[in-house]
């Protein structure tokens, strides 16, 4: 009986760390599903080898050591996940073609709830959100795996250099050197690309911008949408490598190749520390609405600077706990008829 209780206690103790470990593995791997696999593998390994855990470090440090090794093993294949603008030049609308690339090419979206543990301190919560934003995640993917681990542990999770050195079986000098190189790489990318400035929580102006966006998108009103977009706004649609820049090309695409999105419904989601929406397209066969994309929005200076459509109906909606069908609202049909 005692042994069963000990097992249950260990399960509870390990499970407490799931969300923060998922956040760590997601930053390391850039993939929602690989991160969840890595955490599952970490917890299984911890469970199996718990007898060898001597308590010289905390259980949390030990789990991070296992998770780091799991991630480094997964990264030996050398795949760097990316956004479309990390791989190709912007395409003018006249040459727009939808060419998909394999799933493992792309940085994947992640629900905030799966990677951001609840913390009391608002400043700490804001840092955690910033560290899963798409621009920061894409920059992390450019770092060699060990530098990536050092930067996340030191800058995001605020570990001491000595703790990181112990976890990676290396010296403090080596950790500090890796951190300097990682910071330099990130600083270069920041100058080149800049980052969206999103308040946490969203301020009143940003809330209103989102309300106007929903109205413009659901009404497929390109004039209203143009007014919300920064002149250099970027639109991406993984798994397609195409990306568009500027409101003329974006709205032009939406009324041509993207015309089937007219009449969509949007449900708000918390994704990658940014505001987002689950987009459901009208379903002419079954009626109602069918899943189409998870949209992640970037905001700066009162305008939308980026909106990223992660197209996939089979994977993202279950990950976000979203329904796979929406019924039509009777009122909506009369309005649009």
Image: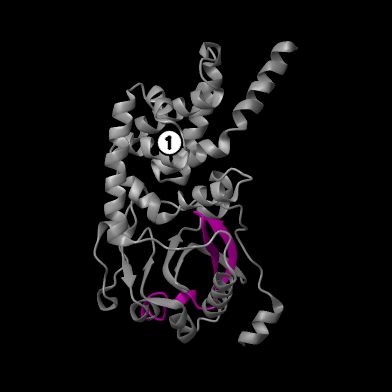
Q: Residue at x 31, y 49 (%)?
A: 186
User: Is residue 188 toward the left or the right of residue 165 in the image?
Assistant: left
Please provide percent x and percent y for residue 181. 27, 40
Q: Residue at x 25, y 61 (%)?
A: 88
Q: Nearer the viewer, residue 173 or 141?
A: 173
Q: Is residue 175 above or below residue 230?
A: above
Which residue is the site of mark 1? Answer: 153
Does residue 204 show up magenta in the picture?
no
Does residue 268 show up magenta in the picture?
yes
**Residue 213 visible within the image:** yes
Q: Residue at x 43, y 36 (%)?
A: 153
Magenta segment:
252-280
| Label 1: which secondary element | helix
Q: Nearer the viewer, residue 135 or 91?
A: 135
Please provide percent x and percent y for residue 133. 45, 54
**Residue 284 visible within the image:** no
Q: Nearer the viewer, residue 327 or 205?
A: 205
Please provide percent x and percent y for residue 314. 51, 54
């Amino acid at each position: 009986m005692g042994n069963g209780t000990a097992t249950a206690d260990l399960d509870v103790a390990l499970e407490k760390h799931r969300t923060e470990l998922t956040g760590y593995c997601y930053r390391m791997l850039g993939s929602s599903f690989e991160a969840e696999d890595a955490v599952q593998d970490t917890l299984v390994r911890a469970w199996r080898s718990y007898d060898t855990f001597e308590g010289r470090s905390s259980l949390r440090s030990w789990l991070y050591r296992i998770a780091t090794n799991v991630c480094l093993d997964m990264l030996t294949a050398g795949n760097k996940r990316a956004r479309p603008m990390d791989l190709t030049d912007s395409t003018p609308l006249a040459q727009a073609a939808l060419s998909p690339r394999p799933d493992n090419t792309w940085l994947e979206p992640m629900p905030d709830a799966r990677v951001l543990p609840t913390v009391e301190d608002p400043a700490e919560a804001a840092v955690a959100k910033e560290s899963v934003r798409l621009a920061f995640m894409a920059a992390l993917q450019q770092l060699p795996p060990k530098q990536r681990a050092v930067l996340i542990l030191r800058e995001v999770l605020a570990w001491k250099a000595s703790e990181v050195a112990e976890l990676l079986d290396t010296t403090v000098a080596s950790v500090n050197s890796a951190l300097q190189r990682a910071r330099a790489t990130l600083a270069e990318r920041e100058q080149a690309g800049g980052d969206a400035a999103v308040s946490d929580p969203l301020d009143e102006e940003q809330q209103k911008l989102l309300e106007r966006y929903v109205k413009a998108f659901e009404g497929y009103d390109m004039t209203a949408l143009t007014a919300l977009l920064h002149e250099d706004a970027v639109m991406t649609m993984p798994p397609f490598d195409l990306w568009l820049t500027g409101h003329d090309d974006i709205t032009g695409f939406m009324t041509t190749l993207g015309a089937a999105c007219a009449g969509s419904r949007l449900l708000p989601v918390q994704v990658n520390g940014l505001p987002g929406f689950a987009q459901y397209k009208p379903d002419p066969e079954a009626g109602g609405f069918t899943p189409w994309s998870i949209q992640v929005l970037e905001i700066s200076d009162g305008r939308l600077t980026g909106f990223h459509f992660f197209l996939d109906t089979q994977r993202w909606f279950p990950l976000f706990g979203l329904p796979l069908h929406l019924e039509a609202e009777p009122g909506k049909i009369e309005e649009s008829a």
